[in-house]
Amino acid sequence: MNPPVEVHRLGRVEYADGLELQRQFQLARRENLVPDTLLLLEHQPVLTMGRAAKFTNIITPRPQLDALGVEVFETDRGGDVTYHGPGQIVGYPLLHLAPGRQDVRKYVRCIEELMIRTVADYGITATRFEQWPGVWVAESRRGGPRKIAALGVHLSRWYTKHGFALNVNTNLSHFELIVPCGIREAGVTSMRDELQKDIDVFEVEERIAHHFRDVFECEVGPAAPPSRTVSVTVRRDDGRVLLLKRTEARGGFWQPVTGRVEAGEAPLEAARREVEEETGLALEVKPLDYEHAFALGESKPPVLVRETAFVARTNETITLDPGEHSECGWFTVDEAVSLVPFAGLAKALRLSAAA
């Protein structure tokens, strides 16, 4: 058997935070601080460019992408341009391929086999085409061959990152923004489109973990769940938002009101408590219907957090806790976005503007 693999099921992760997660886990794996790891998650709408990508395969003008809230990232994975978004399971295997496993082609074929076996559990027959990367439904309900899973990997000294994206309940119209993977002759499909019904994403993740064990010949187990935290964007009537600067001993960075969810608390209760503790004000707190996961700081091994976002309003004076924060300020949303260290926090700040 190969070394065991821990599976982290993270839910929504902003793409920039996902890149940082991969960096931290790969670094920790190199130092033997974590076992081989599989991250399973979902990104917000984003286009990613592989090493072989041509910008001409993004066929939507940048102003239109900006209006849709679709970011573009250049990456070090293989392949051309692809789309990630809600309803798609993205998997990042962060493995060390020891001697005897050091075969890039075999590694890629294992990921393909993982996808083929997973969709087969739902009665979908998928296959490989030698001329095209990824995993395909040869005779799709949508007509012709269509890609159901994209692959793009990066290996450095036999440590892996990036991985696969399986279309489960994905909004396929977003693929019209691009020429997916640079392939003009064939389109894309999803499990939902093939089966004509919504699919339980959590269940599909379980099937992926199950088949990962068999395909990669390793034991697979769940990782400890992320810590639960909250963020609260406090807004004034003039549209400015409150940021607090953590003391140097606590990181020295700017952030909105944040804190851990204590045992027995619901996130809403934690949000109310943290606002009062960090501002001295008892405010009405409203959910933003947004959760995201990320790696907090530069801890080794990485510390994973799943954060629930809220918003509150006030024009009153803030009272700082000097044990936690050295200063505070009221910023425009754009200014605040440029200061916070995590993409998920930036997203919550933007969402607060419409709340």
Image (cartoon, grey):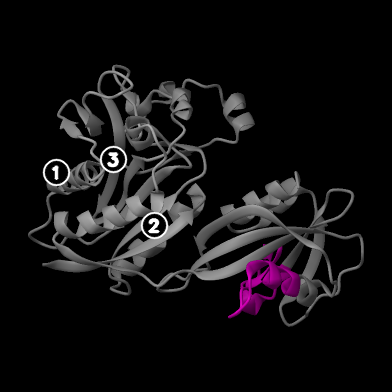
Q: Which residues are magenta?
A: 245-274
Mark 2 and mark 3 lie on one chain; the one further toward the N terminus is 2
**Whether residue 334 is visible:** yes
Query: Which residue is tagged 1?
Result: 105
Compute the Cα span from label 2 to label 3: 16 Å
Q: Residues within 10 Å of mark 1 (few under 14, many from 20)?
A: few
- 317 above or below 156? below
Q: Quadrant of residue 132?
A: top left
Q: Position of residue 5 (x, y in %)?
A: 25, 66
Q: Quadrant of residue 7?
A: bottom left
* Residue under the point 91% across and 67% down: 317
Q: Looking at the picture, which amino acid does disc 2 mark?
A: Gln
Mark 1 and mark 3 lie on one chain; the one further toward the N terminus is 1
- Secondary structure of the residue carrying numbered label 2: helix
235 on left or right of 231: right
- Whether residue 207 is in magenta: the answer is no
Comparing marks 1 and 3, which lies closer to the viewer?
A: 3
Query: Which residue is tagged 3?
Result: 151
203 on left or right of 99: right
Q: Residues within 10 Å of mark 2 (few under 14, many from 20)?
A: many
Query: Which residue is tagged 2?
Result: 22
**Whether residue 50 is visible:** no
- Secondary structure of the residue carrying numbered label 1: helix
Mark 1 and mark 2 lie on one chain; the one further toward the N terminus is 2
Comparing marks 2 and 3, which lies closer to the viewer?
A: 3
Q: Looking at the picture, which amino acid does disc 1 mark?
A: Arg
* Residue under the point 25% across and 60% down: 95
- Whether residue 260 is in magenta: the answer is yes
Q: Looking at the picture, which amino acid does disc 3 mark?
A: Leu
